[in-house]
Image (tube, helix red, strand yellow):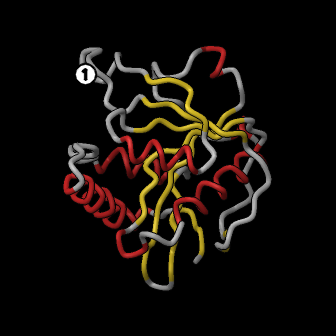
Amino acid sequence: MIITPARPDDLPTLLAFREEAAGWLSELGSDQWSRPYPADRLLATIQAGTVFMVRDADATAATITLTTVAEEGLWTDDELDEPSVFINKLTVARTHAGQNIGGQLMDWAGDRAYRAGAKWLRLDAWTTNDALQHYYLRQGFEYVRTVREGGAVNGGPRVSGWLAQRATGAASFRMIDATPAPESLAAWP
């Protein structure tokens, strides 16, 4: 498997990933990702160079978005002063589930963040998805807190406010990294 930057022509695949993940999560009783993600916003993140794909021959196995921009209202000013990279939209195709691709991708992200000068790899997860939260804890993340207020709609309840982080560091992973070397954090979008 190989990690590459996403291209604009990956947009339909990424939207299908999101839809597939939402369906699977719904079968598990979760409302996570039940609202369609705006295609124009996803295309903008691809064009900004923050979206990466894991390709397995002709199939796309997974995707992850890495950014230095945290969602507003989640992290404190002191935390935001620490050099960090944030994971978003980590998704593994159901055809590739159970192969620890997500774990390898988080190791790759932590390594990339470390090489860019970040201290922390951070994420927020769905507040009601206990299984996902436990998965991240098993991947070495430490729970920080849960932010329940200040959602995107009128400051209402926040659906994705379970916060976790792990220190960045050099890591090995079984995927081929075909991405450009990471720039220092100051140059990230």
Q: Which x, y percent locates residue 167?
A: 72, 39
Q: Indicate left or right for 133 with 39 as reference.
A: right
Q: Indicate left or right for 33 with 91 as reference.
A: left
Q: Nearer the viewer, residue 162 or 116?
A: 162
* Residue at the bottom extreme of this rendering: 57
Q: Which quarter of the rendering shows the N terminus?
A: bottom right
> Is residue 68 shown to the viewer in this render?
no
- What residue is rendered at 50% in x and 80% in y? 56
Labels in figure, total:
1
Q: Which x, y percent locates residue 109?
A: 64, 52
> Is residue 108 shown to the viewer in this render?
yes
- What residue is rendered at 58% in x and 67% in y? 4
Q: Nearer the viewer, residue 116 or 103?
A: 103
Q: What residue type is labelled 1?
A: Val
The answer to which quarter of the image holds residue 82 is: top right
The answer to which quarter of the image holds residue 172 is: bottom right
- What residue is rendered at 50% in x and 55% in y? 64
- What residue is rendered at 55% in x and 44% in y? 137
The answer to which quarter of the image holds residue 5 is: bottom right
| Mark 1 residue element | loop
Residue highlighted by disc 1 = 153
Q: Which x, y percent locates residue 108?
A: 66, 58
Is 50 drawn above or below residue 6 in the view shown?
Answer: above
Q: Which of 83 and 183 is in front in this view?
A: 83
Q: Which quarter of the rendering shows the C terminus?
A: top right
Is 184 drawn above or below residue 80 in the view shown?
Answer: below
Label 1, residues with CA under 10 Å away: few <14, some 14-19, many ≥20 = few
Q: Which x, y percent locates residue 102?
A: 52, 60
